[in-house]
Amino acid sequence: MDEAALDYARKHLAASRDAFAKAAEDADFIASLGKIAAGMAACLKRGGKILLCGNGGSAADAQHIAGELLSRYEFDRAPLAAVALTTDTSVLTAIGNDYGYEQVFERQVEGLGRRGDVLIALSTSGRSPNILRALEAAKKRGLVTIGFTGEAGGDMATRCDFILRAPSDKTPVIQQIHITAAHVICGLIERSVGKR
């Protein structure tokens, strides 16, 4: 690799380090982690479920988080009800074809969501139409709404009961913060709901 490529690597790592340091020092960010974990734990203790959605890398994060909850995170315990709305290709393509891509998560929330469940919606920009529609559907059905977004937040904040803003405007860095924050939240939930 030439020096320009190595400089790119250094800059990316530095941007990641700076965003993580900013998050770690931000009392509101840390408080949001606790509030989100508490809301999710309360839902699970009542027998509710966690629904998750996102596009692209955020879809992968939704699946990752669901896996940590349904399987295990740091220790063995009972499975926790979590469903990534990003995984069923037949459902996604049927809704996309019949109703439009903007409704791929909204219709799943309408069909699967129950009052008191939680919807976690991930959008680095906070402006993804299918994510915003899913949040609106969740609100109408009485779900607790949680948004993971970037520093600007887009239009998500007004549709979410809890919002987690990664302190960056760079999509890859936002996604790194999101999955790390999700790991913290899963650890807090496991300590609250699970038993060793």
Image: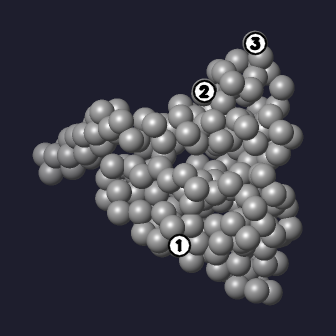
Q: Residue at x 40, y 57 (%)?
A: 150
Q: Is residue 62 above or below residue 156?
A: above
Residue 190 rendering spot, x and y as whole percentages? 68, 26
Indicate which disc, 3 or 1, sits on the residue closer to the N terminus.
Answer: 1
Q: Secondary structure at mark 3?
A: loop
Tell me the amino acid under the disc marked 3: Arg
- Circles 1 and 2 in contact, beta carbons < 8 Å: no
Indicate which disc, 1 or 2, sits on the residue closer to the N terminus.
Answer: 1
Q: Residues within 10 Å of mark 3 (few under 14, many from 20)?
A: few
Report the residue marked by disc 3. Answer: 196
- Circles 2 and 3 in contact, beta carbons < 8 Å: no
Tell me the amino acid under the disc marked 1: Ser
Q: Secondary structure at mark 1?
A: loop
Q: Residue at x 57, y 60 (%)?
A: 160
Quadrant location, the N terminus: top left
Q: Is residue 63 left or right of residue 71?
A: left
Report the residue marked by disc 1. Answer: 128
